Every structure is written in C-alpha cells, then in structure tokens.
Image (tube, rainbow, N blue to C red):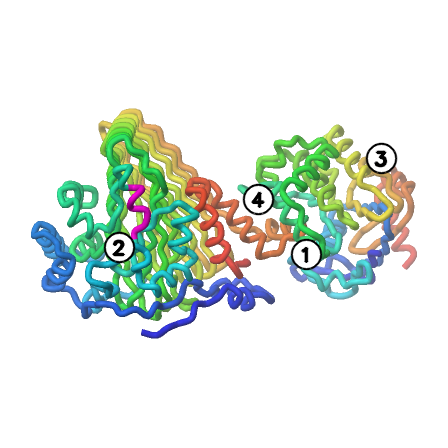
Amino acid sequence: MLKIENLHASVAGKEILKGINLTIGAGEVHAIMGPNGSGKSTLANVIAGRDGYEVTAGSVTYHGKDLLAMKPEERAWEGVFLAFQYPVEIPGVNNTYMLKAGVNAKRKHQGEQELDAMEFMQMIREKAKLVELDQSFLSRGVNEGFSGGEKKRNEIFQMAVLEPSLALLDETDSGLDIDALRVVAQGVNALRNAERSIVMVTHYQRLLDYIEPDFVHVLADGKILKSGDKHLAMELEERGYDWVKDEAAAAV
Amino acid sequence: MSDVKPTTKQEIVSGIESDIKPEEFANQEYEAGFVTDIDADTLPPGLNEDVIRHISAKKDEPEWLLNWRLEAFRHWLTMTEPHWAHVQYPPIDFQSISYYSAPKSKEDGPKSLDEVDPKLVETYEKLGIPLREQEMLAGVAVDAVFDSVSVATTFKGKLKEAGVIFCPISEAVREYPELVRQYLGTVVPTGDNFYAALNSAVFTDGSFVYIPKGVRCPMELSTYFRINAMNTGQFERTMIIADEGAYVSYLEGCTAPQRDENQLHAAVVELVAMDDAQIKYSTVQNWYPGDENGVGGIYNFVTKRADCRGDRSKVSWTQVETGSAITWKYPSCVLRGDDSVGEFYSVALTKMRQEADTGTKMIHIGKRTKSTIVSKGIAAGHGNQSYRGLVNIGKGADGARNYTQCDSLLIGDSCGAHTFPYVVVKNQTATMEHEATTSKIGEDQLFYCQSRGISEEDAVNMIVNGFCKDVFNELPMEFAVEANRLMEVSLEGAVG
C-alpha cells in the first residue's frame, strides 16, 4: 500500500535522504531505527508533507496515489497520520474542537456525513480511555500546559480518534518514563489491525519490547542499510550501529 | 453617486482558492463595500463658525449647545494634530471635508421602521443586520446611525416602560436637555485633545442612553454606524449614563463603503457610571481598511472614556477592531469611585497596509480600584500594530490593583507589532502585574493542524480564534459569533 522508491530529500540544500526504498503492506508494523541524524524523522515528515523538505528525486505512492503531490491535510484525509516527536501547543484552541474539525473534514472528503457534537463526544470519551487520558484533557487547549508524557499520550489519543490507515510514530517513546511508555504502547497495540500499517521511528529497542514489529530497518546516512525482523533490533541493541555501516561499506 | 454592487463572499473565496501565498493576504477584499444611492443633504466641504451654526440650526439646537460647539471650535483652532502615535499618514486637509450629511426624509422623520427609506433598510440587510429580524428574533434594540442622523430606533416602547432612554443624541438634546447638559463634556472635555475638540464643534449624531437608578436594561442596546456619503467625516457623539445600581450592555458595530479617498471618523464616547452601576461597552469595528496598496480607508481617530464616578461602579470595554486604514483609539477608565473596576479587552487585526495604535488608559483615583487589561494584537501582510497603554495609580488609590496582558501574533514576515506600556505609580500599596508575549503563527502549528486533516486556512482561523479567545469570551454571546465570523472573513487568504 505504501511504496517509497528511490526517495531523495534535502533540508536547506543539504541532502538528508539519499535513495530510500521501502514497501509497507496493510496491517504491517515497521520499525525504523538508526543513529542520530540518519534521516529517520525526515522520512516521517516527508511522508506526512511537512514544509521545508525538498524532495529532489523518487516517489511515494499510497494506495496507488502520488502522496507527494498532496497537501498535508489531503494526506490526512487519505489516512496518513503523524504522531509528532515534539507535539505543538496551540493556546486557546480546544483539543476536542480541533479533532472534531479534523475528523469531519476527513468524513466530508470521503463523502460521509459529519458527526454531530453528541456522537463525537461519545466517540472520543471511549478513545480517551484507550490511553488513560483524563477527560479533563479533552477540553483543554491543544497540548497547552501538558507534560511531555501527556503530550505523547495525546498524540496516540488523536491517532485513535482519527483512525488512520497509515500511522507514522516519530520517536513516540522519547521522553516517556516506563509507566507512560507502557500506556502508550498498549494504546498503539489496541489500534493494530489487519488494515492499519504502523511505522515507528525510534532510537531504542525498548519501545519494541512493548510493540512488536514485523520488520526492522536500519537507516543510516540517508539510506536503509539493512532490513530484518525483530531479532535485528535486538542485535542492534547489543552491538550498536557501526557493524551495520561497516557491512554496508564492505558490500560496495 | 454611483451604485456599486456588493462584493460577494463567493467571489472572494474563488479569488483565493488556489495556491495561497502569504502576500496574498493583502488581497482580501472588503465585503461591506457598497454605496447606497440616497438623496443626501450635504454641506459643501470646509469648516468655519458658519458651518457650525448651520449644523446647530439644522438640528434645532438650543443656544447653550451652539455656544458649547463654538467654544470647542475656537479651542480647536489653537490646537495641533497629535503625531505621537506609531502610525504614518499624509496630512489631513480639514477644509476639504464635508461636516454634515443627512439622508433626506419626510418632514418629521420616520416614526417606525416602515417609514424608513427602503433603500436604507436594504443597506442594513446587505450588512447582515436586518433590523426587522433583529427586532423579532434577537431582541436587540438598534439605534441606526446612517451617516450623520439616526434614522431608525427600535424597541423604544419596551425600553420606555423600563424608564430607559435610548435615542439619537440630537433627540435627547430636544427631549431631555437638562440631562444632556448635565453630562455632556464632563468625561471628555471639549479641549481634551485635537479630535475631541473637533468632534465637540461639529458632532452630528450618535446615541444617548440613560439608565435610571436600580434599573437593569432589559435588552442589549446596539448601534450600527456606517459612513456612506463621499468625503464626509463622521463625528458621532455617544453618551451613556448609568445611574446608581443600573446595568447596561451596549454594542456598536461600524462599517463603511469602499472609497479611494480616506475618510475621517472622529467620534467621542462618554460613559458615566454612578454608585454600583455597570456598563459593558462592546465594539465590533469593520470600517473599510483601504486596499492592498494602502489607498483609501477610514481614519479612525476616536476618544472613548468612561468615568467610574460612583463607588463600586464597573465599566468594561471590549473591542474587536478589524477595519480602518488607521486606528488611533484608547478606550479608558477613570476609576474615581472607591472599589470601582475598569476592564479593557481588545482584539485588533491589521493586515494589508493597515496601522493601529490602540490600547487603554486606566486612571486609578479611588481606593481599592481594580483594572484589567487584555490586549491581543494580530498583524499580517504589511500591517503595523501597536499597543499603547497607561496605568496611572494616583496618590490616594490605596490598595489599587492592575493586571495587564498584551499579546501579539504575527502572520508572515512583513508585519510589525509593538508594545508601549506606560506605568505611573504614586501609591506604594498598589499591585501591578504585566505580561506580554509576541509570537508568530508557527509553521509547526499549521502543519500540526494540517496533519490532523484541517486545511491551512481553517488552521489559521482556528489558531487566531484561539489566540483571541480571552477577549471573545467577554463579548455578549450573539456578538461573539459575529466577531468570530468577522475574523474568519478578515483572515481569508491569511497564510504565512
């Protein structure tokens, strides 16, 4: 369903992604690991359509459509969701209000009827339980005054509400203590199903203990150097990334 | 006079549908830009004592008022235009302005809406304020000021029953001369400032409100100002007096047709609150802002002041300012009574070449007086925006408190926001708090909303409305919706 071919992308004239090839099928969970500055977050942001990333070559197709030609909101309507590494505060904008606008924009795009306030409230109360998010957070400003852990939980809550078919989790585990990590992971696991693909960007094996991936990829210096299953992640935890780089260098 | 078709919303939307760039924010067209073709009785341009005598005679004014005007005019001649505000505009030729324009109507003027010129009613309907509907549905009494003479006043009966006086000031001069004379110029003296003096000399109309002792005004009072005739300055004068224990909520909405030349609007508003009285004064101002090159638009030079004369009195100013080429306006409170309270909540939006220098003055005189200032400035395009505020704690103001918060939001890279807070404290028991922030609508905020499926334009509206929330919450409910809509209309295409 998601197909990335020879993707090159630059930020401020500097090439970060240097030819990514990746195919992600329905219902699969992929983990993308790699050292700092390897391009993991760039990949997630390019897929979601953030400004400031210039795609210089390659393609990203999703359900056969050219994702790169779409605005970020159009990608959201097609089912793409990005859980932010650093969720943004929007003072004065009610969390529920923003989500309702997002959900209804998507429904409208899909030709479905918009949810009324009652239906929507009922739905989000259910979803809030999934990540043990206190009801009071629903009526607060978007991420306004939330702790780091609360912000990450709010991201997964939003994912539950928006029901994406492709969820990109950008370092969702960073800044979480072990209890919060467990809650967030439980939420993600509850959202796994045969149609929904999940791409997790992370530094650490730790997250993968809770959310077991089907595939693990090592991204370094803008390229995917190695792919495998969850055992690859364990090996990385033990041996670091250098051996993968050396292996790749030797192969050239 | 030409008859210009109103610009429809659809046209505006289609104009900005594709590829919105930040600079195109400047191209937002003005929705209320149409001219009504009505026979107007307009004085030729120019200002001298004869003109003032003419205005006074037209209005059948008593001798004392004419003398009051002439005195103000003579004082005005000795004054110079103020230039301390952080705004720039070419010099105004006060002799090229016509100081009186009244729609011609039947001998004694209309007695009900049915007698009002249908074209006039149509104008209001274009503005989205059908008087009839407001009468029936909203329960809002409207004193409509069309150019210089109030033409329609609704709900007089019900108000009269409550003892409330709500009428054009010219009528108040005839019907309640003693009341007018007692209060006129006691809050804003004729020589207060250049524009207040000019207004005192030539004011043509405005509203007069008197709420008797212990009466809670049974409905929101509303006035809609609209500048119509070419080259006419609008100099309205509004007075609201809330006697002991009275309460009133008053809203003014302003709009003006599209013109290439600049029009001057120099109003004076005087509020008086006696013991335990409360006045809530809300403004939604949408004067024509000029075009993207800064041609045309209203010069809005207004003096608004409240005198909290009585103990425990309270005055709240709430303003949403999205129009005018230049705004120069500082709704103020003189907190004379002990335990009196002054509040100022403001949202000002400047885009294209608009400039605004606005804020408030809180003059603490009485003991334990309290003031709150919440100012939200939004600048986009080449808009320039300044908050200027004075908090003055007098010697006798024991235990006075002030809280000031001024926040600025920038959209795009070509706009500016400035803050000029002045604080004078002569009493050591005072408590002062001041917070100020300047932020830019972040690309990350926009992207965050977009990645949740919200379009860029909706995201800008959402973020700006969130920013203004503290102020919108202060507006009467039915007008909060209008303010929200106005911001959305004003922000169409505002993406940075």
Query: As rendered, which of B269 and B372 lies closer to the eye?
Result: B269
Amino acid type, label 1? Pro
- Given residues A32 and A191, the one toward you in this image is A191
Check the residue under mark 3 and report the chain it is in: A
Decide which of tag 4 and tag 3 comes sooner along the chain: 4
Element assignment for label 1: helix
Q: Secondary structure at mark 3?
A: helix
Q: Earlier in the sequence, mark 4 or mark 1?
A: 1
- The residues bearing labels 4 and 1 have C-alpha atoms spaced at a distance of 18 Å
Q: CA distance from mark 4 to mark 3?
A: 33 Å
**Residue B333 sits in quarter:** top left
Query: Where does the C terminus of chain B fall, quadrant-wise?
Result: bottom right
* Type of the residue with mark 4: Ile
Q: Nearer the viewer, mark 2 or mark 3?
A: 2
Disc 3 or 1, which lies upstream in sequence? 1
Evaluate whether label 3 is on the same chain as label 1. yes
Tell me the amino acid under the disc marked 2.
Lys
The label nearer to you, 1 versus 2, is: 2
Q: Above or below — where is A209 with respect to B18?
A: above
The image shows residue B473 at horizontal and vertical percentages of 46, 40
Residue for badge 2 = B111
Q: Which residue was labeled with disc 4?
A: A90
Range shown magenta? B153-159
Marks 1 and 2, how far apart at CA: 58 Å
Q: Which residue is mark 3?
A: A209
Residue A65 place in picture, x, y as percent: 78, 62
**Which residue occupies 65% across, 57% down?**
A51
Q: Are marks 4 and 2 on the same chain?
A: no
Same chain for the residues at labels 2 and 3, yes or no? no
